Amino acid sequence: MAGPDTDETDQDALAAEWEAESGGDQDAMADEWAAMMDEDGDGDGEGEAPQAGIAGASNRVLNQDEIDSLLGFDGAGGADGDNTGIMALVNSAMVNYERLPMLEVVFDRLVRMMSTSLRNFTSDNVEVSLDQITSIRFGDYLNSIPLPAMLSVFKAEEWDNYGLLVVDSAMIYSIVDVLLGGRRGTAAMRIEGRPYTTIERNLVERLVHVVLADLSAAFDPLSPVTFRFDRLETNPRFATIVRPGNAAMLAKLRIDMEDRGGRLELMIPYATLEPVRELLLQMFMGEKFGRDSIWENHLATQLWQTDVTISAVLDEVALKLRDVINWKVGSRLMLNTQPEGLVELRCGDQNMFNGRMGQRKGSIAVLIEQDTPRQGEHSL
């Protein structure tokens, strides 16, 4: 095993080699090199070399690809699908705001219902598909809407809040072409750079009414709600229904009509869904949302056939315990009631009815005259 003298010999050799290769004023550089080797050998400067490396790396200029990778952008200039880097930190507080499993069931119902409704509306073969359901900030969504487009603001009457339905330009021209008798097999004519005409707006408004009616029907098994058309806008700034930073649910629908079609985007803020949030948090329970009509009917039938014991209470008397213990055969108990007084009919501890005592076919009977209010009910 080499000793300290061997290490010093190696260090002197390295310093001499450095001096021979450099030429000129190398004495100071050789001394600095030897000092660094001494510190490294003694173990006192273990952190010095890494710090020098970091200082050197901090002076390096990043290229554009490295900057885009750090910020979480792809080569095309948009955010990548993984949403990594600094953008992931910015959006981490909102994007996955909450998962609502039952909302997926509602939109599955909406897709099936819209396929039928739009076929009747256009008299054409229509296929509706759900691309994705995502969470997004409302302000970010408004900035990402491809223009020109029509933005339909609708109100959820029972929830007392608003939502947004966006129809893109391809869908607008396709629906106008179909409803006005355009020939099949030809692409819809698009004239960009002009405002939409009154006819185009009216036809799109009719389409929106059909979609909103189906959306209301899709929510009915979960919570009855009426989505009412409010207004139609072409400028996203005039379609602001919540604050830009609020979280919202975005569902993208694709509508294909043979060689024509387009997209519908349904944006509902989470504030609008708040009244039914507990219902939307349920796990998938089938199309009837967990209700089994067969079991309900069977249970109701069996309840009607159940035997229930009813007790007739003539009167209640409070007595001392010693008097009750002294009772003997033949003892009399005086009741504070009249022969024509009312008798209480009870099922367990619950008062059910009031009636009068009598006889029927040689048996003691009670004629029910009035119903007794239950707990939680109020008599009229």
Image: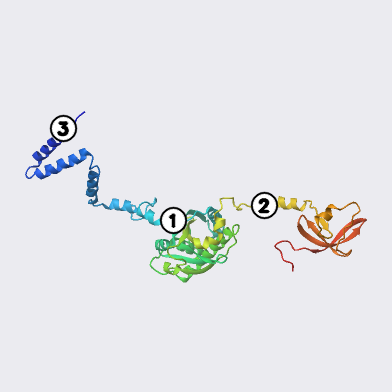
Q: Is residue 365 left or right of residue 85?
A: right
- Which residue lies under the disc numbered 1? 95
Between residue 343 and residue 337, name the one nearer to us. Answer: 337
Figure label count: 3
Residue behind mark 2:
293
Q: How far from the left and from the top, in percent, is residue 60?
A: 23, 50
Q: Name the residue beneath numbered marker 3.
A: 5
- What residue type is disc 1 on? Val
Crowd class of label 2 (few under 14; some 14 to 19; many from 20; radius 10 Å): few
Seen at 44% across and 66% down, the residue is 243
How far apart are the two marked residues, 2 and 3, measured between alpha carbons? 94 Å
* Residue with the most extreme right position: 362
Query: Where in the figure is residue 253, as x and y percent of width and height?
Result: 48, 57
Looking at the image, residue 234 lies above or below residue 39: below
Name the element at disc 2. helix
N-term-proximal mark, 1 vs 2 = 1
The single residue placed furthest to the left in the displayed view is 24
